[in-house]
Image: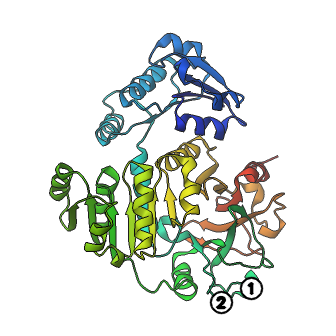
Amino acid sequence: MKIIIFGATEVGCLLATEFFEDHDITIIDKEENDNEEFSKLDISFVHGNACDMNVLKQADIYNADIFIACTPIDEANIVACLSAKKVGGIRTLCFVSKEEYKNTLYFEKNNGVCGDFFIDYIIWPEELLTQEIFRIVTVAQALDVENFADGRARLLEYKISEHLPIVGKKIRECNFTNDTLVVGITRGGELFIPNGETVLQADDKLIFMGTAHSLDILAGTFFHEKEYVKSVAIIGGGNVGLMLAKNLETLRIKTKIIEKSYERCQLLSQELSNTLVINGDGTNLQLLNEESLEESDVVISVTNNDERNLLCSLLAKQLGVKRVISRVSKVLNIPLFEKVGIDIAISPKNSAINEVRNDLAENDVDILATVEQGQAELLEIIVKPEFDGKRIMDLKIPVPAIIGIIQRHNKVIIPKGNVDIRTDDVLITFVKSEDANAVKDCFKVK
């Protein structure tokens, strides 16, 4: 597949790094943005502005399959995508930073205002980040949450504290709940696919897949999640903070926002009906003490500055907050945040790249999500007639992988090795990213 990326930004570099091994990648941007990071990759670089038809032609737009615009300038991304659509008629993905652009572009596409002259997919990273944080917040103690089959099945990730009785036990000895599978473990920053003989260690991050009901029981039994999240404090009242507060209000979770700008506080007060808006600096320890931040079940720092988010998060941990989530603008900073004790560090850019990865996936093998900063993938595989009636244990998948969920019509099955698969079953499969292609090939008709 030939992919043209407009924007030698961090997102552009991450996308190029992600896809250059399997796809033909061309980057378009100014000459001064052609840095050494791109020179390490087997890609083409065209100097110029993708809003210019001649530059698009120089990038061979006529033979391209996908055009992605991810510069910091929304207007340039929109014009470039529309130009690429007009010249090449290819699929276009446009990054925007403003809600009004996203809403307008979706309206025009869905109402046929522009006919065939539209952008296929509009990506607003802050919205994706908000959705991801909201999923995590609503499941107490979870490090990651993904929902499948209209919420009837889930992926949950938990960290094993040293006092839990499962430390030192083999997985098969833990007696985890029925309809639950341990599909992955991250140990020392490295993810692997376990088996029943794997011995669990303190600080392991366990990734479970199962039915929503069984995982609720699992959480209450093994991870002491007997209470729901009742109170949340948000530091930063920007777009993400506002959207999060609105979502939390729908669940009647007690929410407060600490925002430094008085003018922004006024707007927040108008937009939110059941959220306490506090005008103050989230790095002010005295203010955090006065507002009893330590009583919050979760503290979320989502300012647009990594250093400020790190400081706010560390102060929250110092005050005794059990669960702290922090926004990280620079993807490379995520390991630093986790190393100093921040429970969950999430980047809007990572969330957006996951969306692009999903969009580029083949029709019959769809990437539903990635886990642990892209170390593993959840593949959605539709069973073809040639595999009808085969048992899972007989599939001879050449790499470590676990089929965690089978969706059969309206039924959700958490399978064991002796379960038969049927035509049109949807197999949600957990695999390390480096082995994903081998799993896809296994289910292709020879």
Q: In this view, does 161 lie to the left or right of 110?
A: right
90 versus 403 height, above or below: above
Residue for point 69% across, 33% down: 23
Disc 1 marks a residue whose amino acid type is: Lys
The answer to the question of whether label 1 and label 2 lie on touching residues, with beta carbons closer than 8 A, is yes
Judged from the image, the secondary structure of the residue bearing numbered disc 2 is loop
For label 2, count other residues whose C-alpha is less than 10 Å away and answer few (under 14), some (14-19) or many (20+).
few
> Does the rendering let one see residue 391?
no
Quarter location, residue 158: bottom right
- Name the residue located 31 percent from the left edge and 62 percent from the top edge: 284
User: In the displayed structure, does residue 314 sit left or right of residue 411?
Assistant: left
Residue 321 picture location, percent across and down: 42, 74
Helix, strand or loop for disc 1: loop
Query: Which residue bears the numbered disc 1?
Result: 169
Q: Is residue 270 left or right of residue 161?
A: left
Q: Which amino acid does label 2 sit on?
A: Pro
Q: Quick check: 352 left or right of 167?
A: left
Pick whichever, 43 or 148, lies toward us: 43
As displayed, is residue 133 above or below residue 306?
A: below
